[in-house]
Image: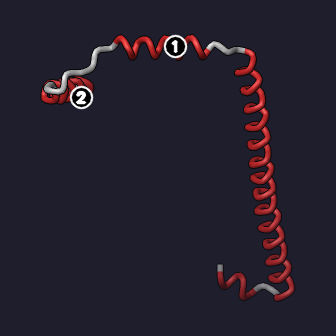
């Protein structure tokens, strides 16, 4: 390819290099502009979803009964015995081994 460039007239070579640089700048500029638009569109969609989510939480205050039920379950659960660390470790090892096979 190098012999082709050396045999080419200087004005043609310069014109081709300029065209190549123009294509390079246009291509990279297009990609840059698209990515900037994508960033702003993502931020805008995030704000819209956050606003919609805020309205949804205001309309449906059903979280309080669920939290109350979770507290009741935690209060009813018996505390784990302190001396069963070996049994717990064996159960974890058995479950891990079973999941691997």
Give the x, y percent position of residue 56: 73, 20
Query: Is residue 59 depicted above or below 21 in this figure?
Result: above
**Closer to viewer: mark 1 or mark 2:** 1
Secondary structure of residue under mark 2:
helix
Q: Nearer the viewer, residue 23 or 77?
A: 77
Q: Nearer the viewer, residue 42 or 3?
A: 42
Q: CA distance from mark 1 to mark 2?
A: 33 Å
Quadrant location of the C terminus in the rendered image: top left
Left or right of residue 8, residue 99 in this image: left
Question: Label 1 belongs to which residue?
Answer: 68
Give the x, y percent position of residue 42: 74, 42
Q: Nearer the viewer, residue 84 or 42?
A: 84
Q: Which badge, 1 or 2, comes first in the chain's sequence?
A: 1
Quadrant location of the N terminus in the rendered image: bottom right
Determine crowd level at label 2: few under 14, some 14-19, many 20+ residues with C-alpha closer than 10 A: few
Question: Label 2 belongs to which residue?
Answer: 96
Secondary structure of residue under mark 1:
helix
Give the x, y percent position of residue 91: 19, 24
Q: Nearer the viewer, residue 2 or 36?
A: 36
Determine crowd level at label 1: few under 14, some 14-19, many 20+ residues with C-alpha closer than 10 A: few
Question: Residue at image x 24%, y 21%?
Answer: 80
Question: Residue at image x 70%, y 81%?
Answer: 4
Left or right of residue 76, residue 8 in this image: right
Cβ–Cβ under 8 Å for marks 1 and 2: no
Question: Residue at image x 43%, y 11%?
Answer: 72
Query: Is residue 52 depicted above or below 42 in this figure?
Result: above
Question: Residue at image x 67%, y 85%?
Answer: 3
């Amino acid at each position: 390819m190098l012999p082709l460039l050396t045999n080419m007239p200087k004005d043609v070579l310069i014109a081709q290099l300029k065209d190549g640089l123009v294509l390079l700048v246009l291509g990279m500029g297009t990609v840059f502009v698209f990515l900037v638009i994508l960033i702003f569109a993502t931020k805008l969609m995030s704000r819209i979803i956050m606003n919609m989510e805020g309205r949804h939480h205001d309309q449906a205050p059903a979280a309080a009964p669920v939290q109350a039920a979770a507290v009741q379950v935690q209060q009813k659960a018996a505390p784990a015995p302190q001396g069963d660390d070996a049994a717990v470790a064996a159960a974890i090892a058995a479950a891990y081994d079973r999941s691997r096979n």
